[in-house]
Amino acid sequence: MTVTPRQLAAAAAVVVVVLVSMATRAPASGALPGPPVISSAAATVRAAQAAKPKIYTPSGPLKVGGCVISVSDPNPKIAAASETITVRTTAGAWVSLSASYASYTSNYGTQAAQDGNAVFELVNPNATPGRTVTLAARATLQASQADCNGSFTPESLACSVTALGEALAAGRSVETVAISTAPGSQVRVEKSSESGFWNYSKSAPSGEVRIAIPVSAAEVGRSVRVQVQVAMLGAQAGCVTSFVPVFHG
């Protein structure tokens, strides 16, 4: 049997049609399509976007919320070691403080801690007894500020004097007085009577001092007045007593 060229061409066309039909045939109804292919770079970007936390940005700058001064002791003892001043304000604010004494002003500055407190330790050996120390504070944070005021007053200077009442005897012509005042005071004693005047000065480092006052024979049996003046850091105070010398032979 002889096959002509035309028959060969027709057979080849049939084969091509069959192959194309097989290639385009739909998959079986039970088969599922595979997952879409996503590049590793795209997956990393999506994961990073999902994990990024939300950050809150304040609508405006921080501001000082207030300013309050408190003192550790409103009436400290004379020559107390220190006085603690606490300024309550906004955490992180810069706090400046001025303390005005009788004759000078001291200035301080520090930053408020996380609890909002700015603490100052004022050493007060030069605080005048009985004279109020005025305090002024200013808290500053960015473009805002707040002011507040306070004070403390050291106890007043005072003294007491007592004649010990010692009787005069042969060879003894003095009367002793005991004086109590603030430690570090300067003490001045003046004795006056009908027969004369006498004075004497002495420091009292511990605040307690005894002074022997001379007594003349003309003063025996007569009233003798003793006046005491104490001074410290510009403050003064006075106290007085009297005694009648008695001679025992």
Image: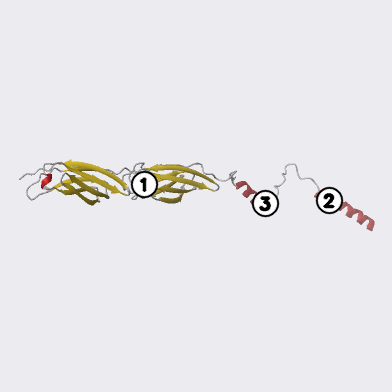
Q: Amino acid at mark 1?
A: Glu
Pick whichever, 151 or 210, lies toward us: 210
Name the spot of residue 131 as percent of width and height, x first: 35, 44
Front one among 26 and 174: 174
Query: Quick one: label 3, few (<14), some, or many (20+) residues within 10 Å?
Result: few
What's the distance in space between the residues labelled 3 and 2, CA to CA? 36 Å
Taking depth in this image into account, of 170 and 144 the one nearest to the observer is 170
Q: Quadrant of the N terminus?
A: bottom right
- Location of mark 3 (residue): 42
Dot 1 lies on which element? Answer: strand
Residue 238 appears at what percent x and percent y?
26, 43
Instruction: Tell me the distance, in whole angstroms, between the alpha carbons under discs 1 and 2.
Output: 101 Å
In the shown orientation, is residue 53 left or right of residue 77? right
- Answer left or right for 131 relative to 20: left
- What amino acid is at disc 2? Val
Task: Give the x, y percent position of residue 146.
Answer: 50, 43
The mark closer to the camera, 3 or 2, is 3
Mark 1, residue position: 83
Q: Residues within 10 Å of mark 2 (few under 14, many from 20)?
A: few
Which residue is rendered at x = 43% and y = 48% of the image? 98
Residue displayed at 17% across by 47% down: 196
**Image check: 127 left or right of 57?**
left
Q: How many marks?
A: 3
Q: Residue visible at 43% across and 51% down?
A: 107
* Mark 3 or mark 2, earlier in chain: 2
The first of marks 1 and 3 along the sequence is: 3
Q: Is residue 4 visible?
A: no
Callout 2: helix, strand or loop?
A: helix
Q: Amino acid at mark 3?
A: Ala
Question: In which quarter of the view is residue 162 placed?
Answer: top left
Query: Which numbered tag is attached to residue 20?
Result: 2
Observer-nearest residue: 143 or 38? 143
